[in-house]
Amino acid sequence: MTKGATGVSEAELDWQNRAACRSESLDLFYSIEDADIRQALAICRRCEVRAACLEYAMTNREHFGVWGGSTERERRRIFRRERRGRGSTAA
Ligand code: SF4
């Protein structure tokens, strides 16, 4: 298993080969225009690796763009919720 510059193995990134966005313009996924974001989210809804994509984005703190059917704002909300959750369980 080889590890790339990010320390993530090729096998761990295999889901990217099945991504519905592979043949789409990345501009849609990193746009600030609502219409583009809606179009990107529609592509995510039909993507078979959506869960793996979202997990990757959360693990790697991907702050920008649409990942795993989530917007930047939605992921920030999840990050905050997770942080609060960890804080409430700390001794
Ligand atoms: S969930 Fe969306 S961003 Fe992630 S791989 Fe699929 S189409 Fe691309």
Image (cartoon, rainbow, N blue to C red):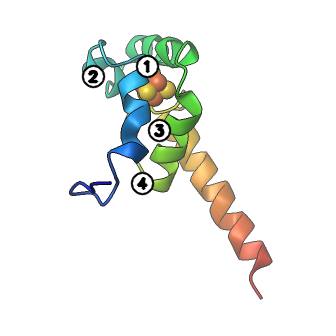
Q: What residue is pinned by disc 1?
A: 37
Q: CA distance from mark 1 to mark 4?
A: 21 Å
Q: Secondary structure at mark 1?
A: helix
Between discs 4 and 2, the one toward the N terminus: 2
Q: CA distance from mark 1 to mark 2?
A: 11 Å
Say if 3 sits above or below 86 in the image.
Answer: above
Residue 48 visible here: yes
- Give the alpha-carbon distance from disc 3 to disc 4, as whole Å: 13 Å
Question: Which amino acid does the dot numbered 4 rest on?
Answer: Asn
For the residue carrying disc 1, how many other residues have a C-alpha within 10 Å: few (<14), some (14-19), or many (20+)?
A: many
Residue for badge 4: 60
To which residue does mark 3 refer? 72
Q: Position of residue 65 (x, y in %)?
A: 38, 34
Which residue position is annotated with label 2?
26
| First in residue order: circle 1 vs circle 2 | 2
The quadrant in which residue 16 appears is: top left
Give the residue at the far front of this rendering: 1
Amino acid type, residue under disc 2 in the picture: Leu
Q: Nearer the viewer, mark 1 or mark 4?
A: 4
Tell me which amino acid carries mark 3.
Answer: Glu
Q: Is residue 59 left or right of residue 21?
A: right
- The alpha-carbon separation of the residues under discs 1 and 3 comes to 10 Å
Q: Secondary structure at mark 2?
A: helix
Q: Position of residue 25 (x, y in %)?
A: 26, 15
Upstream in the sequence, badge 2 or badge 3? 2
